[in-house]
Image (cartoon, rainbow, N blue to C red):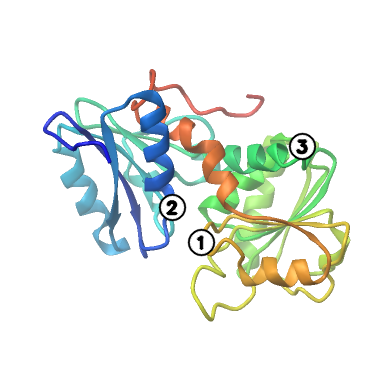
Amino acid sequence: MPQITGHTRLFGILADPIAHVKTPQVMAEVFARHGVDGVLVPMHVAPDGLRQALDGLRMMRNFGGFIATVPHKPAMLGLCDAVEGDAARIGAVNCVRRDDDGRMIGAMLDGIGFVAGLRQAGIDPGGARVLLAGAGGAASAIAFALAEAGAGALTILNRTAAKAEDLAARVAQAYPSCAAEGRGDAADVGGYDIVVNATSLGLRAGDPLPLPVEALHAGQVVAEAIMDPEETPLLAAAAARGARCHPGLPMLRCQIELMARHMGAIGAAAPAPGPGG
């Protein structure tokens, strides 16, 4: 383990709960590879304390930034002083840089990382019919990234149909070539090429499944945004039915250097990609 000294730059990950996060270990590998004297610390912050936590972090001059995860991504958009890339269109932030003057600058990198993880595994979303469960922060980022990657059709499933419909309308406006629709029920789960869970269901023991699994079959890809457990109940059910399973950790590994760069830990902070790049 590297020594932590008064020169060490601090970074954080804010979540509720926090015990499941894998980011500190993965970021430590990035810091070691780039020779960064830094450490990323898990910070358990409840939603009702989020604003106060940011106020404190603004005052820490050796604090470089943080990653925001469940359930803080949508709320973080309104707490940042400015955002880059597609964050405002997506409606959420998952990575924040603290500038020297204490200003917090947000970006949303989940979707970019998710699509990069698919491609790294040889899964091309181009032209695919995709079913996406969820309409929160991570789901919104993944929806925009899938549309940017050329998905032919995108059905967004959410318990509150209005949220799914709103997200679908925003995606369709930004990427007209993607036929996006929002629904409150699962419809024909077996009729899609790629099925994605971008809800938090599966994170805790006893969670219900995020969508019906009976119609899943070989020839489909079933993908997760949840990183721990590595095999969620959804992935276990999909594997039992012959589907190809894609776990959540590649999403993190594919975006982690982008996060380190946005927070200024490596190189210069670069704007997060938006439509077309």
Residue displayed at 63% across by 63% down:
162
Q: Is residue 170 visible?
A: no
Mark number for residue 228? 1
Amino acid under label 1?
Asp
Residue displayed at 17% across by 32% down:
62
What whole-number distance in Å separates the C-alpha atoms at marks 3 and 2? 36 Å
Amino acid under label 3?
Pro
Q: Residues within 10 Å of mark 1 (few under 14, many from 20)?
A: some
Quarter occupied by the N terminus: top left
Q: Residues within 10 Å of mark 3 (few under 14, many from 20)?
A: few
Q: Which residue is mark 2?
A: 22
What whole-number distance in Å separates the C-alpha atoms at marks 3 and 1? 34 Å
Judged from this view, the residue extending furthest toward the bottom is 206
- Mark 1–mark 2 CB contact (< 8 Å): yes
Of circles 3 and 1, which is in front?
Answer: 1
- In this rendering, the answer to whether 82 lies above or below 234 is above
Mark number for residue 156? none
Q: Which of the marked residues, 3 or 2, is nearer the chain's N terminus? A: 2
Q: Which of the marked residues, 3 or 1, is nearer the chain's N terminus? A: 3
Q: Which residue is mark 3?
A: 176
Query: Foreground residue, 120 or 147?
Result: 120
- Mark 3–mark 1 CB contact (< 8 Å): no
Amino acid under label 2?
Lys
